[in-house]
Image: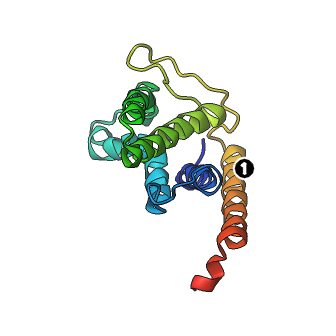
Amino acid sequence: MPFAVTHVLITIIVIELIRDYLIKDKKNFPLYLVLIGGIVGLLPDIDYFLYWVIYAQFQIPILSVHRLFTHSVVWPAVFLIVTYWAYFKKNKKLLYWLLVIVIGLVLHIVLDSITGYAAMLAPFSYTLVGLNLLPDTEIGRSITLAIDAIILLAWLVYIEWRHKISQFI
Ligand SMILES: [Zn+2]
């Protein structure tokens, strides 16, 4: 089960690498889209927020709410279709926005499915699918914390190497 930091960082790193190495016209792919991607990379866990606001008052267990509808591949699929449309309309700004959203959503579902599980096929099936490599145990949480630290350090080293961020401080 990755923590919020992992979701945000992995998405930011992937989108930044795409921006740095694959996108030629950075004018249509401004740096703030990397931040937008990080936010979208965390968005499926909004069901936690909904749980605290709504369900917790009724003593409904978190597992009956979390990683269900918001973790469905239906969301990225819908955005992918619109991305395809933006591609044909040659609307590059919209295309990059939608691409960032698709990447953020897909990475979230993939990360949750590798480290835990998610109801990817909701609302058609609520079967939880995943490898559950980092279960919600004390050891699993320790490893997740270590992964957070390693990813954060690797990203800081990368942006210093690539963008010399220390010059802006
Ligand atoms: Zn999640």
Give the vertical position of 6 relative to 65 (above or below). Answer: below
Secondary structure beneath dot 1 equals helix
Would residue 153 be found to the left or right of residue 97 on screen?
right
Would residue 139 be found to the left or right of residue 129 on screen?
right
Which percent across, then down, holds residue 45?
43, 43
Of residues 137 and 99, the one drawn nearer to the viewer in this rendering: 99
Residue type at the position of mark 1: Ile
Which percent across, then down, holds residue 111?
60, 38
On the rendered image, what quadrant is the N terminus found in?
Answer: top right
> Which residue lies at the image location 41% right of the left edge and 34% below the top edge?
83
Which percent across, then down, holds residue 166?
64, 82
Would residue 98 be found to the left or right of residue 24 on screen?
left
| CA neighbours of label 1 inside 10 A, class few (<14), some (14 to 19), many (20+) | some
Which percent across, then down, holds residue 77?
43, 26
On the rendered image, what quadrant is the C terminus found in?
Answer: bottom right
Which residue does the numbered mark 1 point to in the structure image?
A: 143
Of residues 169 and 6, the one drawn nearer to the viewer in this rendering: 169
> Which residue lies at the image location 27% right of the left edge and 42% below the top edge?
57
Task: Establish whether ligand 1 lies closer than 8 Å to the Cβ of label 1.
Answer: no
Q: Quadrant of residue 86?
A: top left
> Which residue lies at the image location 40% right of the left edge and 13% below the top edge?
124
